[in-house]
Structures are given as structure tokens and as C-alpha cells.
């Protein structure tokens, strides 16, 4: 009887542990996938910003159609749905990332900062085809929106 | 017996000398004679000096960055420093200060009561500021909102909690001469003023010795991050190969030449420098090209 009980209990514990392990690997996979997607998205931001920024600096000649295309891309990218991008357990304590744990403590503020970037990028898309001065006038606001989030929520490079 | 007397005499003389060396040294009474403050010019001093980065509340954005209630904490090997309230509140802040009080604080690290400030407050850089800029800043600070948040005491261990000891530290490290010397253009001199005096770039980008003094032989050559993670980059020509155009653009937008963006405390610096003129950002870039290259 006792032995039977111990066996049953042991079996339950083993099952529970297996369940945790399976659950854990699912979470790890989701966190890793989200982390890759975040980096990919940041890479696409940089690719499109790069053209606008280089034009604003004067290192690449201004071209209205190219500027408009890059700005429209950026606006579209910043408007992508983010609901799967920041799962629990994808912070710097859990995985290899620079996303600070404070993001999950201040998710509303974090999302507001994301909205601010979306607005700044939309404003850039509204004017990017109108001439170099328009791009130069708006690039600082886009940079400011990137910086506002990185200031609070990105850990330093190791 | 006579020998003992000599020892005592020497001890007393030594203590007296130590007391004199460690004494706070305010500016001469007439240091600001004939100067009047211009608040509009003072705003540029405020932005270049990065006052809001430390004296506004943690996470403050927009107009809240102009409420200088203090409270940000700075960890160091000596303990944790808390930035004080420098709002225009006459009790909790510095609304009751004269321009000379502000000049003594910024240029000599001395409080209106005659005590030493800890160099977490970068008077080691501000000491190079012009008195006119300090007077203009004083006029501008008076226009900012008052806030009643009380100051938090620094959290320091012995002997660092004895302010008088800072007199020796200042004797070693408080020096208002320029680091980058020699023949500079007017633009490079302006950049030097912004970087070495108001912008206090060296406070983070230059490594420190065991007593916390800046190792000026390795000026701007990079240092460990006081937050404990990562490093503050080398921004001498030996570490930063960006063009002057790239540097000036970074100081406006935070975008690196690869279009990564500034984070952490440097995002604050960019936020402040974005308020300055193109000419000032270009001047800092020109200055950085004149700093001695370090690997």
C-alpha cells in the first residue's frame, strides 16, 4: 500500500517535472523566436532609416522617390502588431538580449514609447517626398523616439 | 621629553597644514562683478551642461525634464550619490541662491555654507566654464518650476562620508586648465569648451584612478560603465573612426553611422545636444578629431 502510494506520488512528480520541462522549452522557443524577430525588425528600421539619415547628413544625394519609399517602409514597420514580440521570459535576465526587465514592469509606458515612434515615423512618411529640408526637419524626432525607448529599456552592450 | 615636544609640535603643524589644504576655496568676492544674466542664453548652457539628465526625476520626459527635483541615484565604488533638488524652490531647491552661490558650486565645488561637494557633481569639468555662462544659467534656472521634494542624503561609507577629506581630493584633481592644448581653430575651441567644460564628456569617457580622479593621460579613451555592465567607448580618434559629419549627426539624432541608436545615459546626452545649434554639434565633432588618439 505504502509502496503503491510512493510509486503513484513519484509518478505524479515525474509527470509534473516533465510538464514543466516541456512548458519551459516552449517558452524558451517563443522567447528566442521573439528575440530574433525583434532584432530583424530593428535591422529593417536601420536599413530604411539609413537612407533617410544619410540624406539628412548630406552624404547621399536627396532623391524624393527613394526617400518616400524608405519613409513609407519605416512607417509600415513601426505599425506592425507587437503582441507576440515581447513575451514573458524574453528579458536580459532570461535570454541573450539587451531588453531590460523593466519593460515588463512598465509595459504601458513601453508601448506608449512604441506609439511615439509610430507617430514620428508616420510624420516622416507624410513629408519625406517634399524635399531634403523636410527630411532634415523630421529625422531628429524619429531619432528622439528611438532614443527615448533605448534610454529606459535597453541595457548597455556587454 | 624634549623629543616628545617636537613630535607634538610637528603633529600640530601637520594637522594645521592639512586643515588649510582641505579648506573649501570659494571664488573671490568680485568674481562676477559687472555681469548680468540672460535667461535665453542660459538655456543653451543648461542644455550643454546636461543639468536635467541628473537633476530631473528618473524617467522624466517632456516638460517634466524641467522640474529639477533631484533624486537620481549614482552608484560608485565609494557609495551611492543622490542628485539634489536644484529647482527654483527657495527651501527644497536653490531658488534662494545668488549667482555667486551657483558659481561657487559649479566652479569650485563649494556650497553656500562653505562645505565641499562630492565630485559626482561634475564641477571638475564645470570649473572650466566662463563666469558669464554661469550667470546666464542662474538666470535661466530661476525661470524653471519650483518643486518641494526634499534632498536625499548620499549613502557613503567611512571615510568618504567626511566632506572635509574632499579638500585633499580637490587639491589633487581640481584643475581648470584645458586638456587638449595647442593651436586650435575657433571652432575647435568652441568644441573644447562644450566637451571639456559644460558637456563634461570626460566624466564618463575618461578612465579614473583608484581615488576616483580622472586619468587625463587617457583623455576620452573609454572606461568601465559605472552601472557595472559594458564599457563607455573610447571616443578619441584611436577608438572612433566616424567622420565629423557622422559625429555631429549622432549628437543630433542619436543614430550611429550604422543606424543603431544611442541608449542609456548617452541617449540623455543626445537629447540635450539636440537642443543646441548645428554649429555647436559640429564644433564638438571638430574637437574630438583633435583629441590625442588612444588605442
Image (cartoon, coloured by chain):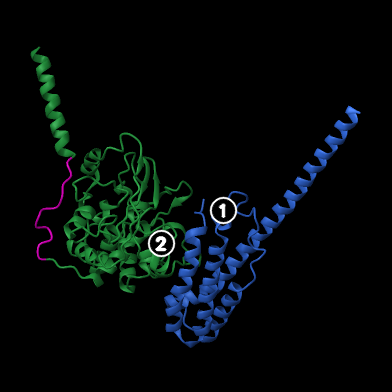
Which is the main secondary structure of the residues drawn in magenta? loop
Let me know if residue B29 is in the magenta part.
yes
Closer to the observer: label 1 or label 2?
Answer: 1
**In x, y percent, where is residue B283?**
30, 68
The image's mark for residue A132 is: none
On the rendered image, what quadrant is the N terminus of chain B found in? Answer: top left
Which residue in the structure is indicated by mark 1?
A101
> What colour has chain B?
green
Residue B9: x, y in percent?
A: 10, 23
In this structure image, what is the colour of chain A?
Answer: blue
Q: How crowded is mark 1: few (under 14 residues within 10 Å), some or many (20 or more)?
A: some
Q: Is mark 1 on a helix, strand or loop?
A: loop
Residue B268 is marked as 2
**Could you tell me which secondary element the residue under label 2 belongs to?**
helix
Q: Where is residue B139 in the image (x, y as percent from the top left)?
A: 22, 66
Q: Is residue B177 visible?
A: no
Report if residue B64 is visible in the image.
Answer: yes
Question: Up-down: is A120 above or below B261?
Answer: below
Chain where mark 2 sits: B
Q: What is the number of callouts on the image?
A: 2
The span shown in magenta is B23-34
Q: Is residue A62 left or right of residue B80?
A: right
Amino acid at each position: 500500500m505504502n509502496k503503491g502510494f510512493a510509486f503513484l506520488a513519484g509518478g505524479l512528480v515525474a509527470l509534473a517535472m516533465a510538464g514543466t520541462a516541456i512548458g519551459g522549452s516552449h517558452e524558451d522557443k517563443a522567447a528566442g523566436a521573439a528575440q530574433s524577430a525583434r532584432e530583424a525588425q530593428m535591422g529593417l528600421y536601420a536599413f530604411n532609416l539609413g537612407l533617410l539619415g544619410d540624406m539628412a547628413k548630406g552624404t547621399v544625394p536627396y532623391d524624393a522617390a527613394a526617400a518616400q519609399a524608405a519613409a513609407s517602409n519605416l512607417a509600415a514597420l513601426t505599425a506592425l502588431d507587437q503582441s507576440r514580440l515581447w513575451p514573458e521570459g524574453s528579458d536580459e535576465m532570461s535570454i541573450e538580449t539587451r531588453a531590460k526587465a523593466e519593460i515588463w514592469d512598465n509595459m504601458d509606458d513601453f508601448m506608449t514609447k512604441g506609439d511615439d515612434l509610430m507617430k514620428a515615423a508616420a510624420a516622416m512618411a507624410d513629408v519625406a517626398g517634399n524635399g531634403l529640408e523636410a527630411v532634415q526637419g523630421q529625422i531628429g524626432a524619429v531619432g528622439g523616439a528611438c532614443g527615448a525607448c533605448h534610454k529606459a529599456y535597453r541595457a548597455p552592450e556587454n | 621629553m624634549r623629543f616628545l615636544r617636537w613630535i607634538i609640535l610637528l603633529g600640530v603643524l601637520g594637522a594645521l597644514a592639512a586643515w588649510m589644504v582641505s579648506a573649501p576655496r570659494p571664488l573671490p568676492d568680485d568674481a562676477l562683478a559687472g555681469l548680468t544674466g540672460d535667461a535665453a542664453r542660459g538655456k543653451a548652457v543648461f542644455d550643454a551642461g546636461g543639468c536635467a539628465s541628473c537633476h530631473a526625476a528618473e524617467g522624466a520626459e517632456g516638460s517634466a525634464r524641467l522640474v529639477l527635483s533631484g533624486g537620481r541615484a549614482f552608484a560608485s565604488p565609494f557609495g551611492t550619490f543622490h542628485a539634489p533638488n536644484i529647482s527654483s524652490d527657495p527651501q527644497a531647491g536653490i531658488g534662494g541662491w545668488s549667482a555667486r552661490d551657483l558659481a561657487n558650486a559649479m566652479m569650485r565645488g563649494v556650497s553656500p555654507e562653505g562645505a565641499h561637494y562630492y565630485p559626482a557633481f561634475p564641477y571638475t569639468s564645470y570649473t572650466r566654464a566662463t563666469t558669464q555662462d554661469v550667470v546666464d544659467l542662474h538666470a535661466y534656472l530661476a525661470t524653471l518650476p519650483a518643486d518641494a521634494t526634499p534632498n536625499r542624503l548620499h549613502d557613503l561609507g567611512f571615510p568618504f562620508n567626511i566632506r572635509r577629506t574632499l579638500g585633499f581630493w580637490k587639491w589633487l584633481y581640481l584643475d581648470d586648465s584645458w586638456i587638449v592644448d595647442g593651436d586650435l581653430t575657433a571652432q575647435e575651441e568652441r568644441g573644447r569648451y562644450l566637451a571639456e567644460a559644460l558637456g563634461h564628456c570626460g566624466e564618463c569617457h575618461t578612465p579614473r584612478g583608484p581615488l576616483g580622479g580622472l586619468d587625463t593621460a587617457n583623455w576620452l579613451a573609454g572606461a568601465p560603465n559605472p552601472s557595472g555592465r559594458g564599457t563607455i567607448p573610447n571616443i578619441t580618434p584611436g577608438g572612433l573612426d566616424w567622420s565629423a559629419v557622422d559625429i555631429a549627426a549622432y549628437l543630433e539624432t542619436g543614430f550611429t553611422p550604422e543606424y543603431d541608436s544611442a541608449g542609456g545615459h548617452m541617449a540623455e546626452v543626445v537629447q540635450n545636444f539636440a537642443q543646441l545649434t548645428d554649429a555647436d554639434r559640429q564644433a564638438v565633432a571638430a574637437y574630438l578629431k583633435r583629441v590625442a588618439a588612444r588605442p
